Image: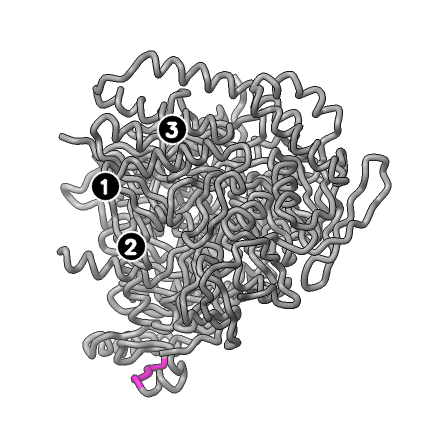
Amino acid sequence: MTTPAEGGQLRRLGEWDRPSIRISIDGADCDALEGDVLLSALLLAGRRVRDSEFGDGPRAGFCWMGACQDCWVWLSDGRRVRACTTPVEPKMAVLTRAGETVVG
Amino acid sequence: MIAAWHVDVAIIGGGTAGCSAALALRKRGLTVALFERRTVGSQASGVNYGGVRQQGRHPAELPLSRRSREIWPRLPDIIGDDCEFAATGHLKLARTEAQMADLEAFAAFAAEHGLEIRMMGANALADAYPGMVSGVVGGSLCPSDGQANPRLVAPAFARAAARAGAEIHEHEAVTGVARDAAGFRLETDRGGRFTAGSLINVAGAWADRVAKWFGERAPIQAMAPNMMVSEPVPYRLPVNIGVCGAGLYVRQIPRGNLIFGGGKGWADRHRMVARPMADVSYSASARLAETLPWAADATVIRSWSGIEGYFEDEIPVIGPSTTTPGLVHAFGFSGHGFQLGPAIGEIVTELVVDGRTSTPIDAFSISRFQHAGHRAA
Amino acid sequence: MVERVVIVGAGPAGVRAAQTLAAAGLRPTLLDEAPATGGQIYRRQPAPFRRPYKTLYGFDAAKARQVHTAFDGLDGAVDHRARTLVWSLEGQRLCLMHEGGTENLSFDRLILATGAMDRVIPLPGWTLPGVYTLGGAQVALKHQACAIGERTCFVGSSPLLPYVAYQYARAGAGVAGIIDTTPRADKLRALPDLLAAAGTGAKGLYYMGWLASRGLRYRHAGIPIRIEGESHVTGVVVRMAGGRERHIACDAVAIGYGLKCEHQLADLAGCDFRFDSSNRQWVVAQDGVGRTSVAGIYVAGDGAVIRGADAAELAGERAALTVLEDIGRPVDRARVQKIDRRIAGIDRFRRGLETAFAYPHHLARDMADHVILCRCEAVTAGEVRHAVTQLGAHDINRAKAFCRVGMGRCQGRVCGPAAAEVIAGALQRPIEAAGRLRGQAPIKPVPISALADAAADLTVAA
């Protein structure tokens, strides 16, 4: 069972009784629950999802429905995924910053 | 009946050629009215890739291209806007030894015109652009080439021309022109009547209609570039790239977006519509993924097209009319006019004002289409 | 020949359209990005979640269950392709992305039931972590059993405002404040129209009453001035009805000003649009029963007109009946008339909602120059005004070309309405003069690698 990490943006209000899934965020292990989307996992663990490319600060998604495109992150193999519409999967390695992908 | 408004020169077409002509003519003290049926720079001048390239030019175009290159870095002084021009260099990549030989031949020709082009083998490419390009045997770099933002150029010339006193008529199409002793009489779809001593036909993919009014044939076709842009990714590609065979051209702007294209989209010049085609986008994307594997994960966020005038011999028409004194043509840049645009205004201005230009343009005469059996229909 | 009918969007409109076509013996294809049908309003929770319908959908539990059951009962009668993005449309074919690959799909007739998203008005601080749309706040709760923060301030002017605040409070989430920009007098003025739809109108009053009974005050005529925080939300400053500024401490803000249509595919199809002055947005022109200006392209649901889920179900069925009429199949005239009557009734209710939750467009028009207007490209309102007044941009597409507003990943979905207000203001012209942002393929981001894979398929096919 997971409790909201200190400093996480989201608060879980129920549905605790789900299998745990181990993922990593920027190299740090993180336990999500089956059925979580990546955006939830990221925002239960912290308050930031990515940085604006144009220097105006951190971003953490906005619309939760695949429209605003403000929550795209990287997987460690370089793939781009939209966090609000991507369910967590075991061993998913999420990167929130560009240029840290494992090349080749 | 309302009296016609008189100007020294009327310009049909608001691309970079027309807008730069409007400015250049004002600088020579002539009165100018430019007519653009949509908005300035909304077709070929505004929707192209944004390559500012001398490398790979048709031999006849190189002097013209050299002249235009002199203007690009001076845009801030001339029009008050740098249009995001950057001399990043242009790297042409060869996928075969035969292509490499072609690049070498062009480099030798360019050297005769004082244009430096550096040949680079696979090792030199790997040293200069580590991990950057794949599937190529070598390339040639023209350091003085570069790139700019096509959306900005024609409008910036138009604003500068307007500040200098030119009349820029957007959303006003010229519907007919007659020539009499007094000069050219123009009518527009907004009821405008103008007379002009000279007429400049820079109407792009629609310029054949103007030529035809004066009995000249110009077998122009519509061509639509198939353009895409990626989301911003970390800036890594310092040079404008073209791949031999025209399957791919790609550049990255400092904001991070990769701008790329290849192949042709769909265009209907009569309805004035053009759009990219998915199948063409697939091919260009495949070529990009092969050539720049590090970029393959980036997402495409937009695609676009527009209408460019194209001749089968892939060089434009530039020069005086063969039938009508006072009429000057410059159109049909066949997909590579963006870099030339700033010089076209100066050249047509010289043709109008001085009757000659110092830049060789004989190869571009509309007379090449006026042979027997080629008469205007 | 069997007509290939494709439906895009598996919300209430798309599901009812599919059901109607399946009942007539066609086997429509139903495409949606989500893993399951239901759309945003009746979005289903992921498999391991156990909350009952009543918890998820409240008063609308029965309707949600009916829509879900209707679809689940269709079994093999519909070719449902989940997790499938339609990213372009070219003539009679769609370009799809599924599981990281792309493919093309031909159709004879197409029903676009592409839904809606929140309309927002940017304000200082709105890009900070912790700021979400009202719809987004609702998805977090409904789909993930999460609140968007420890204490959330709900702001805007939208039927979702009292509803989502109520859902949050009911689920045990902290509610820091509820600020409705519309004056109370407008709510009262709208009452007769709202109560015309007895059950629906009463729900809003119930939510407000329920909140009040828990000591959660629903404040009218409050104007959000800025959202505060360095790396995430720490509060929101609101100018209250009396003019006094008030700081509300919170770590999350949910904001929205009604909904806007998602109609990018209709745009790519070349459909005509018209400006709907009642809620200041462009909508796909249609004949009222789903036909657009392009033969074979139909629209239904909130992607066509913002009328809510009940109307969407009806409009989905109605568009499907129109398709059946157009291909010469018999349709039940009595049913058609009943649908048309019920939609007309909902229209009156919608007029009431537009009054009760007025769109405060002046907040967009008067936005300070330093505010980031386009969050994708980080373009400020001042840069947009500069493009208009100094560079001569005469409409929103020209402003986009000059300063990149609306040019980013979302293609202006988020900033478009507010950008149009800023541009119209700078032009000193009515909002419709600012024009409509053109849709461009891909309507949502598609990886280069996915497009490249399709090229390989083409080669194999050739």
Q: Quadrant of residue C191?
A: top right
* Residue occupied by mark 2: C102
Residue B173 seen in the figure: yes
- Which portion, as a residue range, is magenta? B118-122
Is the residue marked by circle 3 packed among few (<14), some (14-19), or many (20+) residues within 10 Å?
many
The answer for how far apart the CA atoms under marks 3 and 2 are is 27 Å
Mark 1 or mark 3, whichever is nearer to me: 3
Specify whether A47 is left or right of A75. right
Give SS at disc 1. Answer: strand
Q: Is residue C174 above or below residue C266?
A: below
Chain on which label 2 sits: C
Q: Which mark is residue B306?
A: none
Crowding near pointer 1: few (<14 within 10 Å), some, many (20+)? some
Same chain letter for marks 2 and 1: yes
Q: Main secondary structure of the magenta part?
A: strand
Q: What amino acid is at disc 3?
A: Gly
In the rendering, at what x and y percent does residue B88 appear? 47, 72
Number of numbered discs on residues:
3
Report the amino acid beneath label 1: Ser
The residue where tag 3 is placed is C316
Please report whichever mark, 3 or 2, sits nearer to the chain's N-terminal start. 2
Please determine whether, in this image, residue B242 is positioned above or below residue B283. Answer: below
CA separation, marks 1 and 3? 21 Å
Q: Are marks 3 and 2 on the same chain?
A: yes
Residue C106 numbered tag: 1
Q: CA distance from mark 2 to mark 1?
A: 14 Å
